[in-house]
Amino acid sequence: MELRQQRQLAMSDTRRAHVLDAARRVFADKGVEGASIREIAREAGYTAGALYSYFDSKEAIYGALLAESLDRLLAEVQAARAPKGQPGQALAAKAQAWFGFYASHPRDLDLGFYLVNGLAPHGLTHELDRALNERLLEALRPCEQALEDLGLPPDAAARENAALFAHGMGLLLLKHTGRIRLFGQAAEALFAQYVDRLVERFDPAAPGRTLPQRDLFAD
Amino acid sequence: MELRQQRQLAMSDTRRAHVLDAARRVFADKGVEGASIREIAREAGYTAGALYSYFDSKEAIYGALLAESLDRLLAEVQAARAPKGQPGQALAAKAQAWFGFYASHPRDLDLGFYLVNGLAPHGLTHELDRALNERLLEALRPCEQALEDLGLPPDAAARENAALFAHGMGLLLLKHTGRIRLFGQAAEALFAQYVDRLVERFDPAAPGRTLPQRDLFAD
Amino acid sequence: MELRQQRQLAMSDTRRAHVLDAARRVFADKGVEGASIREIAREAGYTAGALYSYFDSKEAIYGALLAESLDRLLAEVQAARAPKGQPGQALAAKAQAWFGFYASHPRDLDLGFYLVNGLAPHGLTHELDRALNERLLEALRPCEQALEDLGLPPDAAARENAALFAHGMGLLLLKHTGRIRLFGQAAEALFAQYVDRLVERFDPAAPGRTLPQRDLFAD
Amino acid sequence: MELRQQRQLAMSDTRRAHVLDAARRVFADKGVEGASIREIAREAGYTAGALYSYFDSKEAIYGALLAESLDRLLAEVQAARAPKGQPGQALAAKAQAWFGFYASHPRDLDLGFYLVNGLAPHGLTHELDRALNERLLEALRPCEQALEDLGLPPDAAARENAALFAHGMGLLLLKHTGRIRLFGQAAEALFAQYVDRLVERFDPAAPGRTLPQRDLFAD
DNA sequence: AATGAATGAGCCTTCATTCAT
DNA sequence: CATGAATGAAGGCTCATTCAT
């Protein structure tokens, strides 16, 4: 009995994941608004109605996708390593981790943006929103920690972390919409520059700290 | 004869503006994709079909709204003045102008973001997109000019201007979506800090330039 | 008073004709179903509403157009002349007249077909239909007369005339829809052949009457 | 399992056919352009959206209807038999077959005419148009064959076949629109007369061939 | 006579969702 | 669990027509 239940549960999870995979592909292909339940179902090899065995609504699919996306983000940030005792490099590594994740997975950025720009047709959103916020903060906490390790007091670390996040998000937005080309710039380079200056500003051990004038205009 | 024509023209313009107002509200509420012609019409007190006397399509409405928003942005940036011969202050003034515009008119931010929303600007006419880009660049040019006046070579000025814009946009995004509260920060303060550091870095005449350490953590 | 009225009436007629001209062009361009009041108005240099000063409805415009088309058909048939005392040639000339009219003015054919295929949204049709029938019969009567002049009794003449008309209409239909190309034939040639055989069959004076076998397969 | 599938398939087909029936009625009533998906759905007892389970578009419905109609036409023509070795009678039988089909199924005539109606076949997929043409030609080929069997060279047979088809179509048109009554004729009789004369002209074995003068005016 | 605003019905189509089987 | 039929609401848009001016 219990075994069968477990097996069934496992199968159910597998199939749920299969649907989610299909959804991811469709969302990636058509965008969040362009994706339809039917299309996702077709991609998964199901009928539209069948999806409702696994998810309560289209938004639930979206929610599961988003949660999973944030999990991957978190994993990637945690996987980013820097030599111990070098908080400046740690900061750079962790910042590059979350920025790189979104830069190389623009669809995950979409997922987040979509929530941000007001989906919420069904009220489920509040819960989802909290989940997003928590995981997001968790993913950014390593950067904040690194800032504190650099000697910044907690409030300053929070401030710098927020600014760092905003900077990255702004760049990702510009990159994502092609707007960055208008400026003839590359988002990655600009982000690296921002991080460099940050480290340079707060890390006494940072190279180049002593001669900011020289490479003032370099990348 | 001429009088009547003028009166009619004025009335027509008024009604067009009235529709545009309604549209602005609906777009802000539902987003560009979520907004429907019917809804806009209802908000304006019209039948759906009636709107087509004033605009050729839903997209045309959006376009008119966006164009007008960018006009106001541009006007505000141009109105921002700084003492002659002080490029550092000019930079701050112009940057604050565009940032302040969007900070205090979040609906205009929406308008621009929606262009941006579903990832790439999809469904938008090429022409419209170009119009947006041109006006946007025009609104940001004064900042670039100020950077050059500070002695930066053109390429560096362009880079810093792009980074500045990205930073502001990131902050506006966080503010707009309430995400900024997660960090316990205020977007305006963070933007001011960014601008300050920018001026400080490039303006030899900037006050506080000599003792950056002191107010390192101040707003 | 009376003069002014006459002048006004004349002007009114002129303008009505002007609208009708525009309508003809639009009908020709877009087809009967594709034409819209707005388009006709634009072509005439008016607003849609203005047309209602001249015509009660869209169908009234159509009716006027059709009536006028039939007038032209009738005029062309009446203008067709053949040497007196040669009913065989008269038959050919008159038949070619109506056939040629529709062959070279396919839009007039449309006009008639449309009525035929059931427009009639407003009840006006009955009257219109009678008008069509009368004028059509009038345009075909010369052929019938020629047949009688060839010595056919009235009922036979009526029968042959009906068959002649049907033959021509069938060919016009095939030509009109491009279907005739499927057969690798030309409508005009086939019609001429039909008329030839008709004359040949009934006209004792017709050339070639004596050796039908010889040119059996010729055009 | 298989049984259930079969049952379901059968039901599905039945419902599709049911929709097609409704569509046939509506198309006949309002014409292809005048008919609306809503009306067809209402006639079938469905919601408009439901039809899209069975057909991809309005045009697909029309296409299915037309294809099926042509299938029936073809079947009827192929079923028409005449004594071997008597090509004259074969010609008459085959010609009567297609003519009779349309004479007794005026809705099928409508279907074909609508392809034809708004002048050129507009809005119709190229593919559909080709399908129509092919099947139509196939249905008429037996007549052409019979003409060749009568000794006509291929080009003459093609010509006579085209003329025969045009004649029948013209008569059907007149009959269908009631116009034939204007002439006090019966379409069937006129068609029979045309076929008789055709056979008489080309079939050496045809009875009455020797005294064409006598029954010159008879039906 | 003419305008231009406005209506209201209609168009084809898409979609998330429900439900009997 | 999965299907497939069906719904009902909504979407952007067109159009003949009316009417105050």
Image: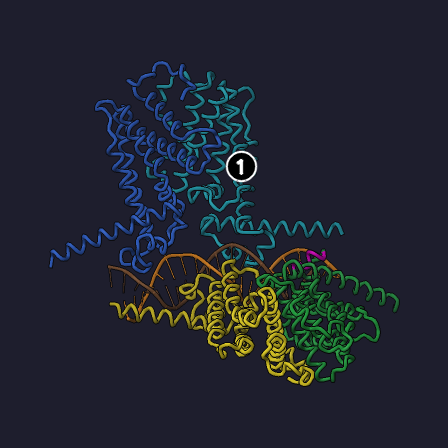
Chain colours: A blue, B cyan, C green, D yellow, E orange, F brown
Q: Determine whether the residue tagged by mark 1 lies in a helix, strand or loop.
A: helix
Of all chains, the one bearing label 1 is B
Amino acid type assigned to the residue bearing label 1 in the image: Leu
Residue A177 percent location from the top left of the image:
44, 38
Give the camera-side residue of C194 and C53: C194
Label 1 environment density (alpha carbons within 10 Å; few <14, some 14–19, many ≥20): many
Residue B198 percent location from the top left of the image:
43, 23
Q: Is C40 within the magenta?
A: yes
Residue C108 as seen in the image, left or right of residue A63: right
Q: Is residue B78 above or below residue C149?
A: above
- Residue at 46% from the left image edge and 35% from the top image edge: A179
Residue A138 as seen in the image, left or right of residue B137: left
Residue A107 as seen in the image, left or right of residue B88: left
Residue B15 percent location from the top left of the image:
60, 52
Q: Quadrant of the N terminus of chain C?
A: bottom right
Q: Which residue is mark 1?
A: B73
Residue stretch rendered in magenta on the structure: C38-44
Q: Is residue C119 visible?
A: no
Give the camera-side residue of B124 and B158: B124
- Residue at 43% from the left image edge and 32% from the top image edge: B166
Give the camera-side residue of D53 and D191: D191
Q: Is residue C105 above or below residue B217?
A: below
Q: Quadrant of residue A78?
A: top left
